[in-house]
Image (cartoon, rainbow, N blue to C red):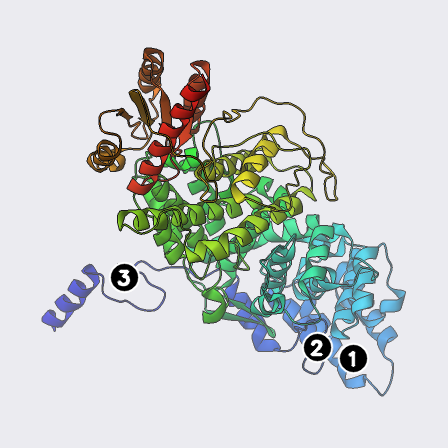
Amino acid sequence: MANSSRRKNLKRSQGGKGPKGRTPGGRTVPRPPWEAVWKRAAGVSSNLWWEPGVEGEPRPKHEDIFLVLDTLASADDGLGSLAAMAAVLDAAEGSCDVSAELRAVAEKTVDPSEAALFAGYVSPDSASQADASAMAGRMLRAHRERDLPDMVAAANLNPRLFTERPLVGVLTIAPLLIYEITRAPGDRPVTDQVSIFFDHCPVPFAGAENVLRLVLAASTGVGLVVPDGADLQAIDSELESNESRPLGRLSAQMLDNRPLVDEFLEWSLEVAAVMQQTQASRSLDQCGAKLTIRFAPIASVAAVVVSENPGTRRFRKSDVPTGSLYATWRRWLELVSPKGHVHRTLGAFTPSDLIDAQGIPFRGEVVRLVNAIEKADAPLFGSTTADRAWTIPRRKTWLVRLSEVLIDQITATEVLGEFRDVLPTVTPLGPTGPTVASQELFLWLSADLEARDLQDDAGDPAGVPSTDAQETLPAVAQLLASRIESALSFGDLAPDELRGLEEWVELSAEILTSGIRKPAEDFDPFIVRGDLGRWLGQLGGWLKARGWKEAKERPEVEKIPDFDLPTPPTDVVDIAPEVAVRVLEPKAPISILYVGGNEAQARIHQAIEEHVSGRYGDMVVIEWVHINWTANWGRERVRISGRLAAGFDAIVLLPLVRTVMGEHVRRTAGDHDVPWIPCTSRGQGSAKRAIDNAVQVVCRQRLAN
């Protein structure tokens, strides 16, 4: 016996499984406080819940409605007596009208407020509009009769019924919210004042998860721009919608009901926080509706999707209840934001920001937040949709992988392979703003250059784009243009997102050409025409000039005024494969300064110098300046300025340097009349091409002089 007891104690100390509801160490994990109440209420009736447009079970008995109210109240407030009188109403229904007699009995036996509630229930047509309790009774009766128009009328006539009788709202609010989100434009709207209910809701209302899923589907459709060939009906069905609720109508109603939706989402996050801090049941019966354990992650993902969408971005300013996964996500974004910024979305991060984030120590609160985010990676709707859903952990991984590509810890090809089936531009729950599309475009461009570098290293013909890039780059670029247009239809971009979009577009432009440039007079930022590099360069200039109007319509493309941009010198070689130039040989020594990169570029020195020596002999000399991603690049700035003043003939600039550093190098080169040539990738092939281009630029300059 003693040995048996000792074994049990050892098992507990080693973290063995304990009884249900306990942690491995033996600590009891509480259940959400509302579960016991709802379980008792569900024991009274299982068919109070119904959804507009869906055929449900037979109507519940009058007695059951008041018994459920009495159970939810858990107090001696007269509702039990009303249930007994409602039983009389059930018995007399269809044979005689006893409503007057029952009202009289109620006035003498229960509190005036409960008497008014019962009077409004048994005689809804004569309920006083000024009496919130009477209108609550009318609401209950309309709910029992499945009379949605009368429910809307009662809510609009006196929305205070939801604050004075919140338990009535617990049973009746869901059909009203579903109606409001899915109604046709000409139908009577539900007043925004109904949202005050969420400040007084004592327990999760019946059907809350059904409403949440509709809000998520609606938010996904706001400003929805999808690639050609995408199946909107498939997206619709994956979000558990149906043909009577197309995304277009849901998204329009979402925009029309922003106060109501915002209040509901904030309330949902509070429920989610409690569920995450307790041991919630996998499925809780709410008198016919179901509240599942998936409510918490769905609420957080819905909040993220709404906050990321340009059309509903005002939700970013809403209070975030502590304890929810959304709050954890927002706090992590805050900790990895650069000094002086508090980013709230993926699209706010620039390449420089992500490089800076690599220097943040991985300890303390950062570790706790990352662990909490990774632990929450669970299916939202089921295996099929979960495979495509952009959960919060997947968003975190996206930012981490982008930062690793920028500092050469991983290739863009590997990241695209990891996200192959869940790229943000093709998944229903991915970020809908333009900046994330520009991040994806950067990855495709980088992967294409990696493929070209591999071809060069293997001795294959250089400058041949990969098959995937040929097929994908134009589509992603056009999607970026369409998303910019869609975002601007809601007004100007948020300043942090505009900052991020500018830098990602500039980085992509530098990969393809020589950076951003002044747009031509006929430039259309919303349609990709001709050479992708030229379009990206002009798009970067257009963004710098803020060339749009704040109007809820397609902005007119106007003539862009003069503005200060690092315009590429006219003698810079365009590295696009289709550009043919006469190859010149140097007749005098040429000195080239290669700027950018880190130790990864240092490893290719020997191969590059062997290439230069084999082709040009001792006529071309290279000096390497690797910034090594440090934020303290002031010393390197002085070093570069000194080299240019000493008489270097050209600069080869790797774009993966800090943005301010790159701007300084280009500006300093212009001050010294030294041409700069972009090195479009980090591999040997790209470096060889850039140096060869630099040699040609210098040779042509000397011929011209």
Q: Which is more toward the observer, 587 or 323? A: 587
Question: Looking at the rendered structure, which numbered label has been put on residue 89?
Answer: 1
- Mark 1 touching mark 2, by CB under 8 A? yes
Q: What residue occupies the far right of the structure in this picture?
A: 126
Q: In this view, does 444 lie above or below 666?
A: below
Percent across and percent down for residue 410 are 31, 47
Q: What residue type is labelled 2?
A: Glu
Q: In this view, does 19 lie to the left or right of 294?
A: left
- Mark 1 touching mark 3, by CB under 8 A? no
Q: Distance between the residues labelled 1 and 2?
A: 8 Å
Image quarter of the C terminus = top left
Q: Which amino acid does label 3 sit on?
A: Pro
- Residue 420 lies in quadrant: bottom left
Q: Which amino acid does label 1 sit on?
A: Leu
Q: Residue at x 77, y 65 (%)?
A: 139
What residue does disc 2 label?
63
Q: Is residue 18 above or below residue 589?
A: below
Q: Is residue 206 visible?
A: no
**Label located before the other in sequence (1 or 2):** 2
